[in-house]
Image (tube, rainbow, N blue to C red):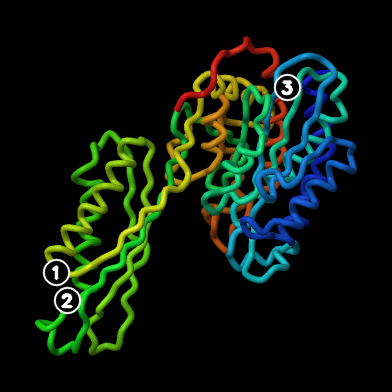
């Protein structure tokens, strides 16, 4: 058995991959509600005779394929939840669920891993080690599915983990990678200003929550621009400012919410503390009360050096790949981060820019779509990494982040 045999089988199974992806695209389910999707995945594995465990940490599904030869245990992960977005693509396989859409490629991730698993199972007698297929629910919504699946044992005995994201902004035929931080920690905050409302003609008798909130927005922008070392990337975004009133009424309350993105844990801690300090100071000066909540989301995705180098050598063997490129750090979040805190591994991007499109719609957009051929590249890259990892020297120790 050679890697070329794997590639040939995957190419022959491409139509099946597309069929699965389009079925899942038509039947999306939101985070923590993916009951039928999980059942579909479990049924697929039972049909091909693979050991499968359902309800792992919630709606997660884990399948294990044991090779006929001794070797390491390699995990591959795909997520399968959708988003609360009403689809506007007008493709024949458009979502049949109003207000719910696979707008991030998770349907493609799942189809990729299912077909790859089927082929690995067919070849298992000639393969070394064990292959753990982690189908994860609830990636889109913190606390996410990864952390509960890990607690429920999905990484038991695993030596290494690989994962990919089909990435529509990236040209088809490209695989991009990065050692160290590749995706940011994703946190959110909520601030409520409790002022004292009144008549729009008598501002001197009020504590204007809109003015106070506006001061906060401007002050928060200075955390990154003036308080964080420019060497460290960070984002503080106020995404919502709500203080709805009649045109002649001064608001007595305002609600602000937003997100913080960081790569460095010390910077993450600092920004959380700075937001609270600024809110306290601004509201104290204005003589009003407030409430402040900071919700920690996923940590940064930090790839391991040796495993990333190994992944690059695997991608360079895939003839469909025209470029293996260094990725810029992404400020988006991913709970694949939790797996990398427990075992070594790497997470990479597979170019999925649709054909004949100059500017693709971004992830989480109602018109988002992918080039389905990217699934074949993802399957070949993951399959190569899974099989050939058994040939690399043992690397001792557990990941330390």
* Residue 317: mark: none
Q: Which label was assigned to residue 287?
A: 1
Evaluate if marks 2 and 1 touch, with contact meaning CB atoms under 8 Å apart: yes
Residue under the image location 68 percent in, 60 percent down:
29
Q: Which quarter of the figure has residue 265?
A: top left
The residue pinned by badge 2 equals 207
**Which of the two residues, 150 or 351, is positioned nearer the viewer here?**
150
Which residue has dot 3 on it? 387
Counting from the top left corner in percent of width and height, residue 118 is at: 83, 36
In the picture provided, is 76 more to the left or to the right than 291? right
- State which mark lies toward you, 2 or 1: 1
Q: Position of residue 6 (x, y in %)?
A: 80, 27
Judge by depth and name the residue closer to the eye, 290 or 16. 290
Answer above or below: position of 230 versus 343.
below
Front residue of this view, candidates 52 and 15? 52
Q: Quadrant of the C terminus?
A: top left
- First of labels 2, 1 by sequence position: 2
Compare marks 3 and 1 and give the one earlier in the sequence: 1
Q: Secondary structure at mark 2?
A: loop
């Amino acid at each position: 058995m050679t890697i070329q045999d794997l590639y040939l089988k995957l190419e022959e199974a491409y139509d099946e991959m597309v069929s699965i992806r389009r079925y899942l695209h038509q039947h999306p389910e939101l985070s923590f509600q993916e009951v039928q999707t999980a059942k579909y995945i479990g049924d697929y594995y039972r049909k091909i005779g693979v050991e499968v465990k359902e309800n792992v940490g919630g709606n997660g599904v884990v399948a294990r394929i044991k090779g006929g030869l001794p070797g390491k245990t390699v995990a591959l992960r795909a997520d399968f939840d959708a988003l609360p977005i009403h689809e506007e693509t007008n493709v024949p396989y458009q979502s049949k669920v109003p207000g719910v859409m696979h707008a991030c490629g998770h349907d493609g991730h799942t189809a990729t891993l299912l077909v790859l698993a089927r082929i690995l199972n067919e070849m298992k007698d000639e393969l070394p080690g064990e292959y753990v297929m982690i189908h994860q629910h609830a990636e889109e919504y913190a606390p996410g599915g990864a952390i509960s699946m890990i607690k429920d044992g999905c990484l038991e005995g695993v030596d290494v983990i690989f994962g990919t994201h089909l990435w529509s902004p990236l040209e088809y035929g490209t695989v991009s990678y990065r050692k160290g931080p590749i995706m940011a920690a994703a946190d959110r905050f909520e601030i409520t200003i409790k002022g004292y409302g009144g008549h729009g003609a008598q501002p001197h008798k009020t504590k204007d929550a809109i003015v106070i909130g506006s001061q906060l927005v401007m002050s928060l922008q200075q955390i990154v621009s003036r308080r964080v070392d420019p060497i460290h990337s960070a984002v503080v975004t106020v995404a919502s400012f709500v203080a709805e009133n009649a045109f002649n009424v001064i608001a007595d309350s305002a609600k602000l919410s937003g997100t913080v993105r960081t790569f460095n844990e010390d910077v993450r801690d600092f920004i959380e503390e700075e937001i609270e300090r600024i809110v306290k100071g601004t509201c104290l000066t204005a003589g009003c009360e407030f409430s402040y909540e900071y919700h920690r989301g996923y940590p940064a995705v930090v790839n391991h050096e040796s495993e990333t180098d190994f992944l690059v050598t695997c991608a360079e063997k895939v003839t469909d790949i025209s470029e293996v490129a260094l990725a810029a750090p992404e400020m988006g979040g991913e709970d694949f981060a939790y797996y990398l805190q427990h075992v070594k591994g790497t997470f990479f991007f597979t170019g999925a820019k649709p054909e004949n499109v100059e500017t693709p719609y971004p992830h989480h957009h109602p018109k988002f779509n992918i080039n389905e051929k990217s699934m074949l590249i993802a399957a070949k890259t993951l399959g190569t990494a899974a099989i050939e990892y058994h040939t690399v020297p043992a690397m001792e120790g557990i990941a330390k982040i």
